[in-house]
Image (cartoon, rainbow, N blue to C red):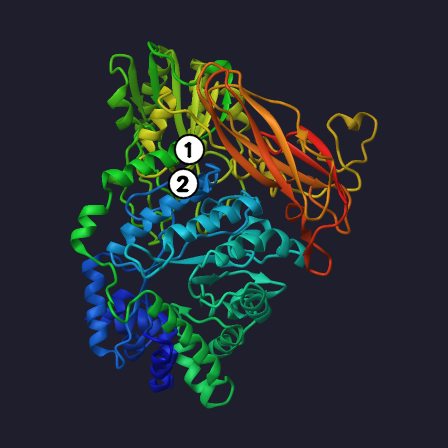
Amino acid sequence: MKQRDLEALLADMTLKEKADQMLQVVGQMILSEDKNVITGPMQELGITEEDVRLAGSVLGSMGAADIKKIQKKYMEEQPHKIPLIFMLDVINGYRTVFPIPLGQGATFEPEVSKRCAAVAAKEAAVSGVQVTFAPMVDLVRDARWGRVMESTGEDPYLNSQFAKAMVEGFQGSDVSEKYKVGACVKHFAGYGGAVAGRDYNTVELSEHTFREFYLPAYKAGIDAGAELVMTSFNTVNGIPASGNKWLMRDILRDEMGFDGVLISDFAAIKETIAHGYSSDEADAAKKAIEAGVDIDMMTSCYSKNLVKLVEDGEVDEKLVDECVMRILKLKNKLGLFENPYKDADEEEEKKFILCKEHRALSREAAVKSFVLLKNEDQALPLKKGLKVAFIGPYTNNHNIMGSWSLIGKREETVTIEEAAREVMDPETTVFRQGCPVLGNDVRIHAFNGSEQEAEVEEADQEKMMEEALRASGEADVVVMPIGEHFLQSGEATSRAMIDIPEVQMELFRRITAVNDNVITVLFNGRPLDLREITRKSKAVLEVWMPGTEGGHAIVDVLTGAASPCGKLPMSFPYCVGQAPVFYNEYSTGRPYTEGIEEVDRFRSRYLDVPNKPLYPFGYGLTYTDFSLSEITLDKEKMEADGVIKASAILKNTGSVRGTEVVQLYIRDLAASIVRPVKELKGYRKVTLEPGEEREVVFEITEKDLRFLLPDNTWDSEKGSFKVYIGTDSQTENGAGFELI
């Protein structure tokens, strides 16, 4: 449709039609002939049958046949034949599931995530989905917050790279093209800064920190063309995001230039009442529309109150028209007026979902996401001829997709045992569960409220333990796949103690007492307290929640068919008491250097634990060794329009081929506002054969030296800088230069 046609359509719509275009419901409400749906959930929400007939979008439906059925029924009753948009949480894959986003961040390879997003879009699109609620680009610094699994980490630069890549992967160059879906950048804004890491909690950030660290990744996603943005649950400057006019109009619309659809998170408009910001649903609706929120997800705030608010002169109808026009434009961009079903196709579902190519990418992405945290005495890869015992609850566990893999099916994932049986000698390899993922005293609930972990009788647990101990005693090496339950990370999974379940730690302690040659494989959605695991393991391999092909990928790395090359996108704290801990912190007036307490105790430090995390941002080992030379700068002074080339020689000093991620950090030594001790400004993935060396060159421009000034403008300041080139954020390999 042309713009003039959209304007004519809008002009012909009744106020009630317009208000309901701004309502999002679940598809079952449209399809159901069951009056219990109408008198039950709909009535509780305050949504009428008329509202459902006129609702503008659907949440949570998928499958080509069902979506065609919903759209057909809806279009038959819609007075202007305006099609629905079907939206769904497609986070780290549709049916072919990739590593959780935090794991994808560990690849330090946004192009991989772009390819994964494109595959997810293809599978979702043929299943009728037209918009995904992804990517989540919230900056995360606190491991207690369960939703860190949906982010790509703690660094604004890295997050921005992945935000751009994922949006481009989902949408392509034209969202109306076949196999593309609209992307929704979320959660705007600052959701990852929840106080104490407690989900849905308030956010207390200075405006400077908010703008400089938290906003850049959202901006990157918007600049990449994201069609939608989702509001966050939290407050910003004391005002809930969904009713925050400064945040949504001044920052998002005016400063960032976003002109797409702004959708609330689930019931977030109504929740401004619980925040104590809105007095009732009508007040919540008024504040949300004044902030420019276009779609109310699953409440009746808009549908029940907007008409009266306009008629009473409380809300200008122009605000309604602005919102509805943005919704109509999105539907037009998706091509829905010409084809309301877009790419929904039952035959293509069969053809593409979980196809060979998609599974191959899942395996590749998983391998690249794994981070080798420890490898004492080259315990990995496993040496041929050894008797190997796989012992742990993730040995043959299909729940390795992550809690937001709502469409993925656990029976379609490949476990470690299944993969190992394909390539390892059955005469020298055994598999034992050892214990359940959780003890009987722990209850975990899924989104539908059902328990996900069945109780195991005490006698059965003891039998499992005995079998594991026997196998361990007979083995040369024990591989222990252990970790969080897949529902211990994700939304509403904040944890005060970020450790591995106690029932598994008991197994770990008893196994390591019998056999000290233990390799630990970690499944988790957040950084964990790994002090004991690290101390007692010969090797530690972080595999996150790796997705559909996780078992194959893990066995590839364990056997040396593939080499780990991932780097931590988020610091692993020494213990939970450090949280939040992150590499790009500010120095204090009394910075602490290890050992200085002997002469000066009055420093910024803990009495009982180190300041530094157990494993820092950017850390990760490989199966070979690398050396990195001192930095060479082609000049020591840079003019505003100039370039400095910083380089170092990377050499593979080991005996096998390997890939290293060389990282560039910069520090502004003195500025008009305090600067971080280091900031990531670039990285290179370099693969070298044994003995091979290569010069790794970074170009530094004035743009790399810019920061947010006290007046909220971005610029650089003349002065001294230090550049670091290393293999993690704690590198001290530095050189100085000056901006003149």
Q: Mark 1 and 2 residues: CB-CB less than 8 Å, in contact?
A: yes
The structure residue drawn at horizontal position 28% and vertical position 41%, both measured from the top left corner, is: 358
Q: Which residue is at the front of the view, 164 or 14?
A: 164
Question: In the rendered image, is residue 68 in sight?
Answer: yes
Image height of 311 relative to 725, above or below: below
**Helix, strand or loop for disc 2:** helix
Please name the residue that numbered disc 2 is placed on.
112
The span from disc 1 to disc 2 (Cα, nearest Å) is: 9 Å
**Res 64 quadrant in image:** bottom left
Q: Residue 494 at what x, y percent from top left?
A: 50, 47
What is the three-letter code of the residue carrying label 2?
Val
The residue that mark 1 highlights is 368
Q: Quadrant of residue 636?
A: top right
Q: Which amino acid type corresponds to the residue marked 1 in the rendered image? A: Lys
- Identify which residue is drawn at 22% across, 78% down: 77
Given the current orientation, which residue lies at the most extreme left position? Answer: 347
Residue 58 position within the rendered picture, expressed as x and y whole percent measured from the top left: 31, 66
Q: Is residue 531 left or right of residue 365?
A: right
Q: Is residue 562 left or right of residue 241?
A: left
Q: Quadrant of the C terminus?
A: top right
Label 2 neighbour load within 10 Å: few <14, some 14-19, many 20+: many
Q: Tell me which label, 1 or 2, sits earlier in the chain.
A: 2
Residue 187 sits above or below residue 720 on the image: below
Q: Is residue 121 left or right of residue 291?
A: left
Q: Is residue 299 above or below residue 571?
A: below
Residue 488 shows in this picture? no
Label 1 crowding class (10 Å Cα cut-off): few <14, some 14-19, many 20+? Answer: many
Nearer to the camera, 18 or 696: 696
